Structure formats: C-alpha cells, structure tokens
Image (cartoon, rainbow, N blue to C red):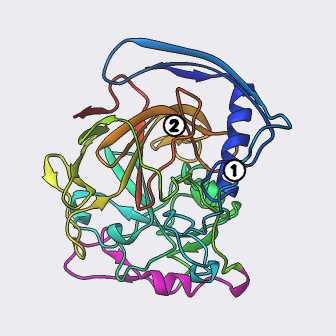
Amino acid sequence: MTSTIHRTSVVALVVAFLAACSSGGGNADSTTSTTTRATSTTTASTTTTTTVARTTTSTSTSTSTTTTLPVIVREPLTGEPVSSADEIVQRPALVVKIDNHPRARPQSGLNQADIVFEEIVEGTLTRFAAVFQSGDADPVGPIRSGRSQDVDMLGPLNGPVFAWSGGNGGVRALIRNSDFINLDAGFTPGYYRRSGRGGAPHNLYSSTTALWANVPPEKMAAPPAILSYLRPEETFTGQAATIVDVPMDGVRVRWEWDADDEVYRRFQNDNSHDTEDAGQVIADNIVVMGVEYHRSAADPKSPEAQTLGSGPVYVFAEGKLRIGVWIHLDRLDPYGLVAADDSLIELPAGRTWIELAYNAENFVTWQA
C-alpha cells in the first residue's frame, strides 16, 4: 500500500486545518481560498490504485454573502461542546503509558482517557498512551516504560505530563530533553506496586489525581485540540463499516460497532478486551493511521513509529468509514485528516482511539 502527497499541497491543507481548529471546529472565515492537491492512494480492501488530482479556486466578490458560524467552546481532547470556557478544567494533558502484556490485563483507566494511542513495541506486543484531561482515573495502570516514538507522537499536546516507568538511557535522554513534564516513576511520588497483579514489571499503578499533583502551578493550563470535530448539527458521513480489524503485529485488534450504545467495542485476539474498572474497552471514534516503523536509534530492539509526515488514514465513527490521508509535518502541529475530495475529516465529539498500524497491504479491513 502506498500513499503520497505533494509537500506544497500538504502545507496548504495544514493551513486550512489549523484555521478550522481555531474557529472551533467550523469552517474558517476566508475571502479567497485556493487549494491544490495531488494524491495517490491504494485502499486496504483492494489492490486498485486511485489517483486524485484536483485544483479548486474560489474567490469572493462584492456581491457574495458570507455566513459566519459561531465559535464552539469545546473540551480540547474530546470536542465535547461546553457552555463556557470556565467549564474546561485548567490542567495539561496527562499521558500514562499503559502495559498491554497478557500479564497486565485487565488494565485500569482506559475507558476514562480522552484519547488513547496504541503503538507497536518489541516482542509482538502493543502499548497504550492513554491521554487524560477532562476526566480522572483511580487507579490507572499498569504503567510501563516509554519509547522514543512518544516524543513526536505526543508533540501536538504541547508539553504534556508524561507518566511512565522509565526506559533505557537513550529514551530517558530523549524524554528529559523534550518539552514533556517528566514524571518518571523512578523519581516521582505517587506510584505504587499492587500485589496479586502478576508481579513486577506488570503491577505499577498510580492515579490521575496523584500524578497531576506533581505538576507545577504555572503549567496548569488546558492543551490545544489535536483533532478536528464536527459541529453539533453535522453528521459523520461515509460508507458502512461496523466491524474493523487491525492486525497490530502480534495483537489482533477488532472493533465492533454497538448501535444500541453507539460505541465501538474492542476485542483482542478474538476475546473481549475488558478493563478492571469499567467493563469492555469502548470508544466513540477509531482512527487507524498507516505509519512506517523503523528501528529506534535509542534502542535497536524497539520499533519506532514514524508519525511525522503523512500516510493513509481510515476513520471510523457512527458505524461508518471515511478514507483519506493523515498529515503531521511538525511535531507540535495537530493531526490533520484529509479526505480524497480535499475536505477535512472531522470527528463526532467523543473519545477517540488512534491505532498506529504498520503501513502494509491490508493493514486494516472492515465489514459493513
């Protein structure tokens, strides 16, 4: 599977995306706009290559009518509308690295996170970066080590709190030199070992309250949005897709749309993925990004997801699918999701899981 996009066109699309984010999820105000884009993508369900080459130009005149949509105040990481900015808790994003080893299951806190990234690590395992901001979890864990790929992957959160159990010297140096608020378990209060949970290293826990307590007062501010969301009156449109399969190396991930509860339910290796504290893992939106994995310079045994650049993306919401390209040119930029018709793929408000899958043939399949 291949997906390419011209850099000049990417820049124009990112500018449009940033403008849309700053306008509260609606269309950015503009009098003149020009978008040029050429892409070549191959879908995961076929071997057909589709090439899109398109130029659109729109210029307002003195007789045109501009409708300005009101800015929507939202929770930054779920897109949930709130009546006032005062309702948004002023604290940074808190990222907790959560173990997905068989001895670490069931985990705690996954259903309380606003966003969860799933990344492939060594030993045919995956690991979660659970991002909290609007809610809390007590306990949360088991907590494991970080990876070099976390620095670029989490960059859009603008200096997040990073709760982890350390790593090798190379990874420690990367985290220490990043803009993260480093809550390494080896040097930070608030972590503890639990008995009866398989033993170390699969039994390290904390709580979001205990972790946020380590953040300096001057850092207690809400993060920016890293995804774009639909307005409340808009609906997610796309082809039917109620069952989603994502082979994440040694973990076979399946998401099934529950029309009654209006959530996706998660399965691992054909079994329900249950949490210790909140039932089966669920999410409102699933974003599957096709990424390249290289060997980490900090640890040659660890694969490193390449999240800077662009690649194919499959976005699932409300039992439907839109296909496009993910764009992330600078580590501090939000993630832009762009469809083949040059429109932004905006998500319904809610909790989102982001799967960082190998960009290979059939890296995601689905059923209507």
**Residue 171 lies in what quarter of the image?**
bottom right
Q: Nearer the viewer, residue 309 or 193?
A: 309
In this rendering, position of residue 188 left or right of residue 111: right
In this rendering, position of residue 90 left or right of residue 204: right
x, y (%) of residue 232?
A: 48, 59
Mark 2 vs mark 1: which is more N-terminal? Answer: 1
Q: Is residue 239 above or below residue 56?
A: below
Q: Is residue 201 visible?
A: no
Magenta residues span 189-218
Q: Which type of secondary structure does the marked residue at label 2 adopt?
A: strand
Q: Residue at x 59, y 30 (%)?
A: 342
Q: Which type of secondary structure does the marked residue at label 1 adopt?
A: loop
Q: Indicate whether residue 204 is drawn in magenta.
A: yes
In this rendering, position of residue 119 left or right of residue 111: right
x, y (%) of residue 91?
A: 60, 79
* Residue furthest left in the image: 271
Gap between marks 2 and 1 measured at Cα: 50 Å
In this rendering, position of residue 227 left or right of residue 313: right
Mark 1: which amino acid?
Answer: Thr
Q: Nearer the viewer, residue 349 or 283?
A: 349
Residue assigned mark 1? 67
* Residue furthest front in the image: 63
x, y (%) of residue 57?
A: 74, 25
Residue assigned mark 2? 295
The rendered magenta stretch, by its main secondary structure, is classed as loop
